[in-house]
Image: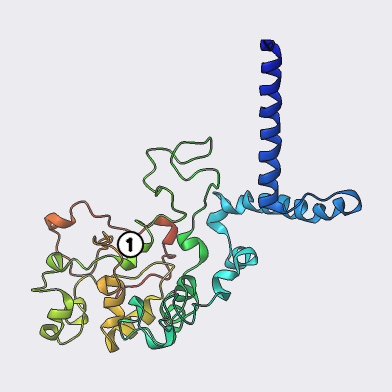
Amino acid sequence: MESPRVGITILALVACASIVGGFAGWRMRQHGPAPSGPTASQTQPALSASKDILRATYDPIHFKPAIETARDDQCLACHREVLEDKVSEASPAGLKAATSKAWYQRLSTYSGEQETFHRRHLATAMAKELMSLSCNTCHQGHDPRDEAQQTSATGALQSDNGFTLRKVVNVETTCLKCHGQMNSKVMGLPHPWPESREVFGGSCLTCHAAIRTTRHQVTYLKAAEIEAAGQKNADVCYACHGGLAWYRISYRYPRHFWEGMSLETPDWAKDRPTVSEARFALPASVQRGY
């Protein structure tokens, strides 16, 4: 009968072999065969690149307060692919982009070929004409160690309402601004805008020439250009106010004071803010009503 000690030794050797074999297999999958002899130095550039990526990932520009003053050229130095990438000519099923309509091409405000997400917000004709979006308009930093609140030393607090679980952008305070549903009921429309537009002569300014006339006074929009374009084509207004909705809910826009505004606040507006977010505020010398 074999000694128990011999059996334990055999089991230990098998376990060690499994660990070594598992590691070798993992390394093969990750890096290919391990170099040996004179070729071992060939791994050094890869190691250096890995360290550079790690250093860049934790660069202060990705965290507050540096992200708040980051310039687009600083961001695009590493993320230039967001403007260089193009949409595929055809889907995996063979549907050609040139002969199909994307959801964002449904309104008359969009012209030209299909574009990628970031290019639609930064590089298209409409984006340049009506918007002044920057990288940090939407991106306000991101801790790569964790995407859940208060699970790391630098993570957002549970009480932080400016945080969206596992997203690099807070969609409730950025995307929803222009991609929420139109609240037709609050606006007093008899039906959703596509069904009501003829009643108002196809123009939002039939009412808004005198109602809520202090609008678009933020750094990421070109107020004068929006007003001028909206007078020619109501889709300019509708595009950002329900026409290109991603969400089932509407954005709770601040209710800025305008000349002739009633002193009595409607029930639906009693918990609305009365000013835009401080980080998007224009200098007082630039602000003007319409």
Instruction: Look at 53% across and 39% down and name the residue there.
Output: 154
Nearer to me, 270 or 36 = 36
Q: Residue furthest right?
A: 38
Please state which amino acid type lies under the numbered disc 1.
Answer: Leu
Q: What is the number of callouts on the image?
A: 1
* Horizontal relation, residue 287 to residue 182: left or right: right
Image position of 131 (left or right of 185): right
Quarter in which the C terminus is drawn: bottom left
Residue reaching furthest to the left: 190
Secondary structure of the residue carrying numbered label 1: helix
User: Residue at label 1?
Assistant: 176
Residue 182 coordinates in the image, percent (x, y): 22, 68
Query: Which residue is at the front of the view, 31 or 4?
Result: 4
Along the viewing direction, whichever of 94 and 288 lies nearer the viewer: 94
Residue 104 in the image: above or below residue 15: below
Residue plotted at (36% across, 69% down): 217
Q: Residue at x 11, y 69 (%)?
A: 188
